[in-house]
Amino acid sequence: MGPRAVIIGGVIASLVLAMWEMIVEAVLPAGAGVFGPPIAIGATMVRSLQGSANPIPFDLVALLLGLAGHMMNSVILASVFGLLVARRALGTMALAGAGAASGVAVFIVMWYGVVPAVDPLVLNLNGGAFLAGHLMWGAALGLVWASARTRGVPNVAPSARQQAAEHRL
């Protein structure tokens, strides 16, 4: 995948996950609140928020840091996804499935490894919704890339070798 597809896919997938989490946390009775998810991410830097109860208190700096950090991490993880799947001749559903599987892998690493060690406030979020959001993140990433391939976006179209492999299938 080219840099354009990585950035666009990563940002769109980030928005899908963020919107899902913010809506879910706003409607759950014990949720973190509509701005809770990005603020929890921003609490990586705004350490005074660690230990807060739900709903997570509003903090503009943490909100902005969380939104920016989430998109940045999404683009980085989209790059990793691209390195793993870009050279494979995958159709739309296979890309969406590979993306969803990648999203689950990201959830497992984050929820059980990174978050407890670096930003435990994120554990205030609903774990099931967090898992579903990461699954949607990956599926959205795969679908954006499949769409970019069919639209002929530069640096996204399959190589001649990929096209030949698809033709043989």
Image (tube, rainbow, N blue to C red):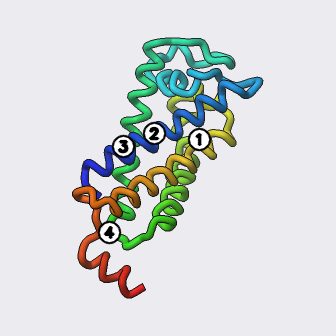
N-terminal-most mark, 1 or 3: 3
Q: Separation of disc 4 and disc 1 at Cα? A: 29 Å
Q: Label 3 is placed on what type of residue?
A: Val
**Mark 3 nearby-residue class (10 Å; few <14, some 14–19, many ≥20):** many
Q: Is residue 137 above or below residue 62?
A: below
Q: Position of residue 115 (x, y in %)?
A: 55, 35
First in sequence, mark 4 or 2: give its number. Answer: 2
Q: Which residue is mark 3?
A: 75
Q: Residue at x 34, y 56 (%)?
A: 148
First reached walking from the N terminus: tag 2 or tag 1:
2
* Above-or-below relation of 90 to 111: below
Q: What is the number of the mark on residue 14?
A: 2
In the foreground, 134 or 42: 134
Residue that appears at 55% across and 46% down: 134
Q: Position of residue 103 (x, y in %)?
A: 52, 51
Q: Residues within 10 Å of mark 1 (few under 14, many from 20)?
A: some
